[in-house]
Amino acid sequence: MSAGPVIAAASGLLSCHVCGLLSRGAHTGGTLHCPRCSAALHFRKPNSVARSWAFLIAAYILYIPANVLPIMETSSLFGSQDDTIMSGIIYLWHSGSWDLALVVFIASIMVPLLKLIAMTVLLISVQRRSTWQPVQRTRLYRIVELVGRWSMLDIYVVTILAALVQIGALATINAGPAALAFGAVVVLTMFSAMEFDPRLIWDPLQKERFDHE
Ligand SMILES: [Zn+2]
């Protein structure tokens, strides 16, 4: 055996997800339990790819109503108006607030879509046991996870938008059904990233190296 990084799973070692204890286990047999806290032990998160896909597909489906349905329902003396995210952005752009329009566009349309695409790339590459750019893919995963925590920014933007419109006119603003779909997209993408096991990115490379040795 050459000196270098030790791969726990290849050496038959598992770490406990709850207490972090490293213990020895065999690849065969039933469920292993941590000798210290008796939590179930796994070499990799069980069914990580399938679960991650399930959340991701649900997020893709809800991305449609989030963009098609009204996010804001404005009603004033002059009538009522429904705005989707995109029509809101266009309104902001034409009324001169191009900077705010840009922020809303990036936070509400670009970032959620890029996260969905990033998770798709990660899942497909892992399923195909790709050995392509593992460092970059791990970095991509870290970015998705990091952005997930700050994603509620999108919701804040909508709230700020509502407040701005409210100041401008004597009107009542209600969040439309898209706001709910929108929040669901954010949460589902976060779940998808949480279920994904980034160690899967490195497993095909390991396998390849073992085969060569
Ligand atoms: Zn434990």
Image (tube, helix red, strand yellow):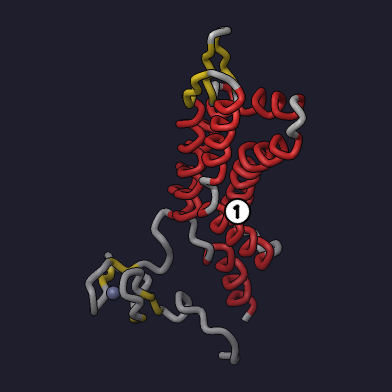
Measured from the top left, where is residue 192 in percent x and y? 48, 49
Can you say which quadrant of the picture contains the C terminus?
A: bottom right
Q: Quadrant of residue 43?
A: bottom left
Can you say which quadrant of the picture contains the N terminus?
A: bottom right
Q: Residue furthest top?
A: 78
Q: Secondary structure at mark 1?
A: helix
| Figure label count | 1
Residue 195 horizontal side relative to residue 100, left or right: left
For the point 58% across and 63% down, which residue is it? 201
Foreground residue, 126 or 101? 101
| Looking at the image, residue 177 lies above or below residue 56 | above
For the point 70% across and 24% down, which residue is it? 91
Q: Amino acid at mark 1?
A: Leu
Measured from the top left, where is residue 140 in percent x and y? 64, 58
Q: Quadrant of ligand 1?
A: bottom left
Measured from the top left, where is residue 134 in percent x and y? 65, 65
Measured from the top left, where is residue 175 in percent x and y? 48, 26
Residue 118 horizontal side relative to residue 52, left or right: right
| Looking at the image, residue 58 lies above or below residue 12 | above
- Give the residue at mark 1: 122
